[in-house]
Amino acid sequence: MPPSTQTAPKATNKVGLRVPTTALETVLVILSRYREASIAVVAIILAIYFQLASNGAFLSSQELSVVLRDTGRFGLIAVAEVMLMITGEIDLSVGSTFSLAPYVMVLLSLTWAFPIAVSALAGILLGLLIGLVNGVITVSFRVPSLITTVGTFFLLQGVVVSIYNSQPVVAPVQEPFNEVFGENLYGPADSVWSLHGLTAFTPFLWTVLVVVVMAVVLNRTTFGLHTIATGSNIVGAREIGVRTGRIKVYNFMIAGAFAAGAGIINTTQFASADPLAGGPFLTLQAIAAAVIGGTSLLGGSGTIIGALIGAFVVATLNNGLVMIGAQATVSDIYLGTAIIVAMILNVQVDRLRARRRL
Amino acid sequence: MRQNDIAAISPNAPVILEMSHISKTFGAVTALVDVSIRLRKGEVLALVGDNGAGKSTLIKILSGFHRPDTGAIVYQGKQVHFGSPREARAVGIETVYQDLALINDLSVYHNMFVGREYHKHVLGFKLLDNKKMRGLARTYLDTLGIEVPSVSSTVDLLSGGQRQSVAVARSIYSSPTILVLDEPLAALGVREGAHVLGLIQNLRQQRSVSIILIVHNYNQVFEVCDRINFLHSGEIVLDASTAETSEEELIRIVKSGLGRQAV
């Protein structure tokens, strides 16, 4: 939701309504109005810190292309999680869909010589189907989505590793598909403005495009309005004619398709489909990005732009700490802390908003 | 001031809704037993009765939220079956539920138009026409004399009376044929209640919409209603015009819990 620019009810000096008095309250008020802005500040501070700590290497085009690739991968899935979290659901199976869809894509092309673009489409369709199954189990059989998707996570992970006994398969390279979806890596000799240099950023650029589209979908379409209504007050939404079940299923399908898309881009990048490319860790990192971006799990509100910034924070922590010579595992300590702090802030800001009617 | 200065409803006014022999059970709980109600055009019908008498179940059947086990609904001369609230709304039956069905995270004007949004086409895409909805909501609330801080503020910022007023305004915006109000005055202060009551009284004066009203306060029943149906344990025990009955009789029935014949 765009931050409300309206003045609070005039009666701020009446009983029961308090104007923020302390500095802390003022900060929380600002946070609640401009969530994306506040996480953007955090992201910028992090970038500056790593830039200084790495003696100017962090913001070089080469390193940035790596960070932004990760941002694209986490961001694409995080956007879908935000939509689901707004409806009050969650999808933990995205990590397996991320592995399975490109695996199927590559096998289709290798076995039946499908053009890779056609196989990719089939992979996306598979993602949609997985989302449909998750959605129907959750909505029609009333299984909490946390459980549904843990189930489908293991199931799909089991399927993908059993196909070729956990062996990665080499993905066919067909231009321009591979170039458009991130085959090129940024080389030291590249210029950002060359085609080769620009295509090194394509995984990120695709995600930016999706973020823009989904931000419009959430804030400017009936589907977005009904998504918010479903998560904010499911009984009320149903009473006024919102098809809450359908809205949830559609959002599960979006999550499946986006996870498949992210997996396909990832496979194109490495020209290899790895059954273990996704996994639980990827799921959790994407959820972390959504939460750090300012979406709470309570439903009814969330921010798409925030998810992208949150993904950048996660990717920056992962890569930046390694760059400045920390052990790779140390970044998890920071990531864990960031999630907890972000979640405390989200919940507290929501509570404050409800209590004080900011 | 019993009937105020509003003329009694004509006995020739056409019957717009007839729910007959409606029964409904939820598992082991029997909510309604062979309940029949009739509503004339322009009439304000009060459904009264204790908690758990089945009032809410009855109106949720009318609004398409529940399906009756037995019985028929004849609306504007035709038998209807509502599979969802959406279907009932589409033919002009609007309901304001006790919980108001307001979406706290959405603005006042989005709440007014959820489920019947206005769109505009941008580059071939169907987007919400927020400007139009905002303008329409503002004008409409002004017409009804409903004050809100701003139509763009989220509804969780409104007071109880404002929320109730917005919910009522939303339901009468589409000029429904039948308006169902479930406890519109519950949880409202005296002044806020008077305002909502005023809205209902205005609608009644125009006699263009038929209203089913669930209320607890008998005093208010006599102020705004033409006829009273008393539900007790899932059955109608009294059906009388407000002129034929009195607050005392209602209280007697409540106490005996049996109905008119027994009193």
Image (cartoon, rainbow, N blue to C red):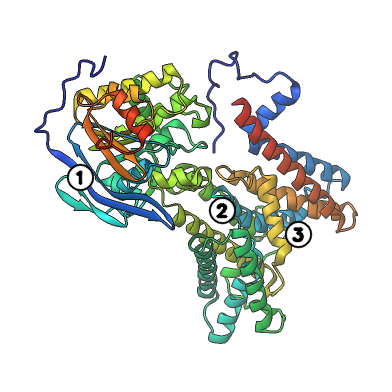
Front: mark 3 or 1:
1
Task: Name the amino acid, label 3.
Answer: Ala
x and y percentages locating residue A18 in the rendered image: 64, 19
* Alpha-carbon span between mark 3 and mark 1: 81 Å
Neighbour class for label 3 at 10 Å: few (<14), some, many (≥20)? few
Q: Residue at x 50, y 74 (%)?
A: A118
Is residue B144 visible to us here?
A: no
Chain containing mark 1: B
Relative horizontal placement of residue B262, taking residue A210 as reference (left or right): left
Q: Label 2 near label 3: C-beta < 8 Å?
A: no
Chain containing mark 2: A
- Residue B51 vs A57, above or below: the answer is above
Relative horizontal placement of residue A259, taking residue A24 as reference (left or right): left
Q: Are marks 1 and 2 on the same chain?
A: no
Chain containing mark 3: A
Task: Name the amino acid, label 1.
Answer: Glu
Q: Are marks 3 and 2 on the same chain?
A: yes
Residue under numbered circle 3: A189
Residue under numbered circle 1: B18
Nearest the viewer among B108 and B19 is: B19
Q: Secondary structure at mark 3?
A: loop
* Alpha-carbon span between mark 3 and mark 2: 42 Å
Neighbour class for label 2 at 10 Å: few (<14), some, many (≥20)? many
Residue under numbered circle 2: A84
Task: Name the amino acid, label 2.
Answer: Leu
Relative horizontal placement of residue A317, taking residue A237 as reference (left or right): right
Q: Residue at x 11, y 31 (%)?
A: B11
x and y percentages locating residue B18 in the rendered image: 20, 45
x and y percentages locating residue B110 in the rendered image: 43, 36
